Amino acid sequence: MASGTPVVASDVGGLQYTVVPEETGLLAPPKDEVAFAAAIDRILLDPTYRNKLGQAARKRVETKFSWEGVAEQLSELYTDLAQSVEVPISKTAFVSA
């Protein structure tokens, strides 16, 4: 994906998050060699579709899997968590003037 190549992968584990079907590549059912081969053929036989998937794959890598992209996602996660957690105020806390 980082090289602008669309991906054909099995629809399992982390690949389900990495590859966006019909956008950055294609997912085939696990252990289905016929579906896997059909997905490869589909990409190889249509250069326009292949290029569209490849460009989207590269963009996804840059936004989701670069250091900057990962840092941004973590920042958003921490912000969301901080907003959803109530922090109790200790009765022994004091404010100095």
Image (tube, helix red, strand yellow):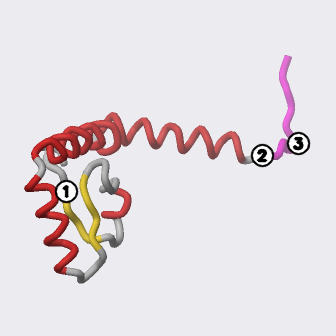
Camera-nearest residue between 67 and 89: 67
Q: Residue placed at 88% from the left, 42% from the top?
A: 92
The residue that disc 3 covers is 92
Q: Nearer the viewer, mark 2 or mark 1?
A: 1
Left or right of 60? Residue 88 is right
Q: Nearer the viewer, mark 1 or mark 3?
A: 1
- The disc placed on residue 56 is none
CB-based contact (under 8 Å), mark 2 and mark 1:
no
Up-down relation of residue 89 to residue 31 (above or below): above
Element under label 3? loop
Element under label 2? loop
Camera-nearest residue between 29 and 89: 29
**Which region of the structure is painted magenta?**
86-97
The residue that disc 1 covers is 7
| Mark nearer the N terminus (3 vs 2) | 2
Up-down relation of residue 59 to residue 46 (above or below): above
Marks 3 and 2, how far apart in space? 18 Å
The residue that disc 2 covers is 86
Quarter holding the C terminus is top right
Q: Quadrant of residue 11?
A: bottom left
